[in-house]
Amino acid sequence: MANKKIKLIWDFRGPAAYKTAEHHEIHLKEYITIEGIELNNTGFTQINDMHSIAYMVVEETNMIAVRDALKPHRGEIYTS
């Protein structure tokens, strides 16, 4: 069975939320490069005018290390 994937999510709120989420994704991509993480699935999404998210998908086996290093606000099982 394939390893589960976890979507780690950072929430940003306020009038600058979208730009902040967009910028945060740059740092997530840098982390993936520095740490040599195989999965390279990141992004950002606007929920509404005052709430946007940045996210990174990781293998379940890597989730705790990434969570402890990057401190996401929440996570969920990722389904593609």
Image (cartoon, rainbow, N blue to C red):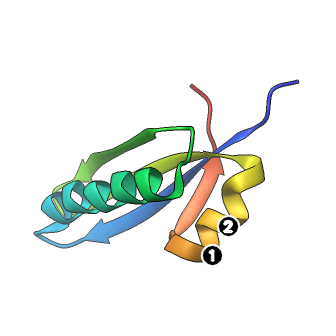
Residue 77: give x, y in percent of width and height.
67, 44
Task: Tell me the crowding category of disc 2: few under 14, some 14 to 19, or many 20 or more residues within 10 angstroms, Cα based.
Answer: few
In the depicted structure, whether residue 80 falls above or below residue 35: above
Amino acid type assigned to the residue bearing label 1 in the image: Asp
Residue that badge 1 annotates:
68
Residue drawn 42% across the image and 64% down it: 10
**Looking at the image, how many numbered discs can be counted on the residues?**
2
Residue drawn 56% across the image and 65% down it: 74
Residue 61: give x, y in percent of width and height.
77, 51
Please say if the residues under marks 1 and 2 sit with CB atoms less than 8 Å apart. Answer: yes
| For residue 21, side relative to residue 74 (left or right) | left
Cα separation between marks 1 and 2: 5 Å
Residue drawn 26% across the image and 55% down it: 26
Residue 21: give x, y in percent of width and height.
25, 59
Q: Which mark is residue 65?
A: 2
Task: Tell me the crowding category of disc 1: few under 14, some 14 to 19, or many 20 or more residues within 10 angstroms, Cα based.
Answer: few
Quadrant of the image containing the C terminus: top right
